[in-house]
Amino acid sequence: MYRPGIGGVVGGSGILASTGANLTWWIVFGVVSLVVGVVLVRVTRRRRQSGNA
């Protein structure tokens, strides 16, 4: 917890700053986007291969 006048973070031993921002949904969105992208690429490649054969 930050207290003005102390000169630093009190009780914080983590490497990252505690900004209060909730990043959970952004991380979930990023992972889901990656999975959807990989699935779309694989489907497209399979369609192209089956169409050329």
Image (tube, rainbow, N blue to C red):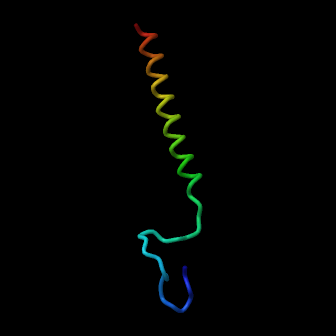
- Residue at image position (52%, 46%) is 30
Where on the picture, by quarter, is residue 19?
Answer: bottom right
Q: x and y percent of residue 28 in the render?
A: 55, 47
Please state which of residues 10 and 20 is positioned toward the viewer in this rendering: 10
> In the orientation shown, which residue stands out farthest toward the top?
53
Q: Is residue 3 above or below residue 18?
A: below
Residue 52 x %, y %: 42, 10
Q: Quadrant of the N terminus?
A: bottom right
Above or below 40: residue 13: below
| 16 to the left or right of 25 | left
| Residue located 57% across and 46% down the image | 29
Identify whether 31 is placed above or below 53.
Answer: below
Q: Residue, x 44% and y 21% (percent of image)?
A: 45
Instruction: Classify the position of the C terminus by image quarter.
Output: top left
Identify the residue at the far bottom of this view. 5
Residue appearing at x 48%, y 16% in the figure: 47
Q: Nearer the viewer, residue 14 or 5?
A: 14
Across and down, in percent, residue 23 comes to 56, 58
Query: How many numbered tags mark residues here?
Result: 0
11, above or below 6, in the image: above
Pinpoint residue 49: horizontal percent, then vertical percent: 41, 14
